[in-house]
Image (spheres, rainbow, N blue to C red):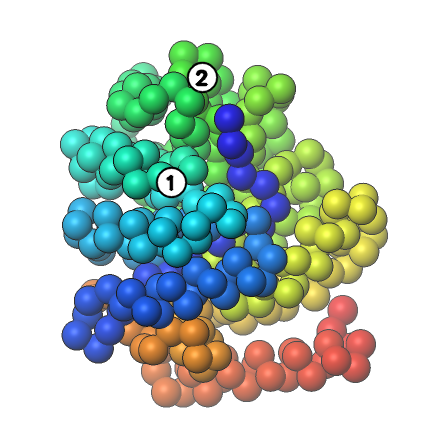
Amino acid sequence: MKKLYGTVVPIVTPLTEEDTVDDESLMRLTEHVIGSGMQGLYPCGTTGEMMYLTVEERKHIAEVTVRHAAGRIPVFVHTGAWNLKDTLELSRHARRIGADGIGVVTPSFYRLSSRELVDFYVSVAESVPEDFPVYMYAIPQNAVNDLNPEICEEVASRCPNVVGVKYSYADFAKMQEMMLVDKQRFSVLAGPDYLYAPFCAAGGDGTVSGCAQVIPEHFAGIWEAVQKKDYELAAARQRQTNRYISLLNRWNNIAAFKVLLKEAGIIRTARVRRPMEELTAEQERELLEGMERYQEENRYGKGI
């Protein structure tokens, strides 16, 4: 079964000034990610403003992305939603349109027991064919509920199509424990992209990084070094990349990504879905100046 690895990009959702999905910008963004040498696409995730989109918008984004990617790199659609019914509907839809797999965040808002979380993921996995890959996804700082190795182990043992987990809390010890789940087939991806190099050096499969859509060359460089097992170079490139990550995360990182993608001519607006707000003019200026300064330092070898 197909699994994710390397740099997987949870793309933003480009919006028009009228607050509708901008198909042309979405196709350009998809093309940009593929052309930058990234290893996977992950639409409608946290970076894609998933919980502020309607079910129909999410289906449409998935369709456009899958169609435009045309099998050139894997597309795993994020399908976790506010309730189980919508999650199952989005999951089955992703399978119908030819996505390579799905990612599913834990249920949000209400704190659930381990048994409830296991039952949730088993329900999702059983709603699609046994050969359709499913990634579990935990981001407890946003969703309240967390995953642990025991939950992952039980779900994976009961559902052959649950192939891994995306873990987006910076608990390196827990990530390493998750690598022990069914070691022959269970994939672990890191959400914290500033841990990309050390995580892969410890045996992880890759990262899911929103930052990678605006600085793909840095993530490509880390992955290249990891593939060569040159961990000293990977660490140096990670340190360099972390300066950019810190800048991008200084404000609402989704809004920051959109500013830079608009500046690059990839998307038409930097609009985000309310109640989130765009960056202020002053924040935009600081962001653009900071990016330019770091790029100049790197050009002259001063960025590490």
Please tell me how crowded label 1 is: few (under 14), some (14-19), or many (20+) other residues with Cα within 10 Å: many
Vertical arrangement, residue 190 with respect to residue 256, above or below: above
What's the residue type where badge 1 is placed?
Answer: Ala
Residue 173 coordinates in the image, percent (x, y): 61, 33
- Residue at image x 47%, y 58%? 210
- Residue at image x 28%, y 35%? 96
> Seen in the image, is 22 located left or right of residue 206?
left
> Seen in the image, is 142 located left or right of residue 295?
left
Exactly how many numbered labels are in the figure? Answer: 2
Residue 243 coordinates in the image, percent (x, y): 63, 68
- Residue at image x 65%, y 42%? 199
> Seen in the image, is 28 located left or right of residue 177?
left
Vertical arrangement, residue 137 with respect to residue 289, above or below: above
On residue 194, the disc is none
Which element carries disc 1, helix, strand or loop?
Answer: loop
- Residue at image x 47%, y 63%? 31
Residue pointed to by mark 1: 99
Please tell me how crowded label 2 is: few (under 14), some (14-19), or many (20+) other residues with Cα within 10 Å: some
Residue pointed to by mark 2: 160
**N-terminal-most mark, 1 or 2:** 1
* Discs 1/2, front: 1
